[in-house]
Amino acid sequence: MVKKFKIASTELDNRYILAPLAGYTDCAMRKICSSFSSALNYTEMISAEALFYNSKDTIKEIKDTYIDKENRSRLAIQLFGGNSEHIIEALKIVKNIGHYDFIDFNCGCPVNKVIKQKAGSFWLKRQDELFHLLKEMVKISDKPVILKTRIGFSSIIDMNHFVKEVEKCNVSAIAIHGRTREEFFSSKVHYDVIKECKKNASIPIIANGGINEDNFLDVFKQTDADALMIGQRAVGYPKVFQDMVDIESGKRKEETTLLSQLKTLKKHVQLMYMYKDEKVASCQLRSISLKYLKGYKIDNEIKKRIISAKKEEDYLDVISSLMSLNKHI
């Protein structure tokens, strides 16, 4: 039996969540992950500054959330930014033009261009301002507010105190990436810190960092988390969610083959070109396509064709060629 869990009054089908990933978790990837049983999907990081200054591309990203109405999965829109006033105005825009179940505020992104805006994990150095902002976001939002954070900037902070202060803001859940900003994505994940947070928390705690279909049950044991958030593993392998649902329910995990990966990639390609400009879709699919093929022996000529692809037909031709070569698998 697969366990469910709630954020505020909203019940999710299972405990497996697609993390926000810039350049990846667009409406095409969200649709794919939903078909593989993700319970909650996140948008890419949405810039509050871009919304505040009326960026057409960013507004389109928000409007594209209406595509998610067709998905079984719930949806969270994640905002990031360093200017509190602009974040509040951006939230008002999102309320008017988006379709979503939760608003999430990013307090964890470690990349330099975000840190330079005093955004992302930089908020861990501006905690009083952060708590004030979260209270305002909860007041304005007509949907539950979630916070996504790391466990510190240059070192691990007092996360029990931090979680308690966030709870006072009436935030509905906290997703915790078990690394500091300085640790980026390369160090071990401090699941023990997440466990301490959960021990003292009165709202759901979502564990994030280094989770895949092989270790997720162990992560549950190490953290006692209410749910798990999966990011990098889902890029090129969205079936990770179905694997975890099957394993938890005691079913035999369906075998993954190159042919099954190619079928999913084909669907991903078609969705990308359905929803995006040809140039943008072609550029983004270069890295995405290679991630679907990771771990399989692929001829270098095929990889060159993927890297040089400039339109949907180019990608579909490469996929068809590979499927023909591997139809016996």
Image: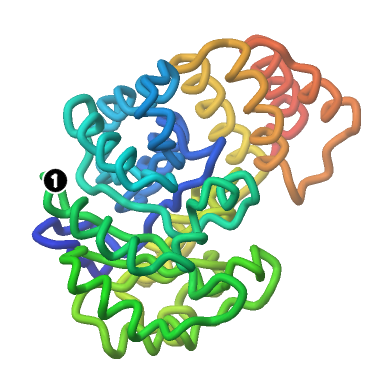
Task: Point out residue 282 in the picture as x, y percentages from the top left corner.
Answer: 65, 18
Task: Point out residue 316 in the picture as x, y percentages from the top left corner.
Answer: 64, 17
* Residue at 25% across, 82% down: 201
81 and 259: which is toward the camera: 81
Q: Residue furthest right?
A: 300
Query: Badge 1 is on which residue?
Result: 140
- 267 to 11, vertically: above or below: above
Give, as a three-letter code, the residue at label 1: Ile
Could you tell whether 306 is left or right of 134 in the image? right
Is any atom of residue 324 visible in this view? yes
Task: Point out residue 261 in the picture as x, y percentages from the top left corner.
Answer: 61, 40
- 220 to 108, vertically: above or below: below
82 and 104: which is toward the camera: 82
SS for dot 1:
helix
Density class for disc 1 (Cα within 10 Å; few <14, some 14-19, many ≥20) is: some
Could you tell whether 49 is left or right of 114 in the image? left
Quarter-of-image position of residue 16 = bottom left
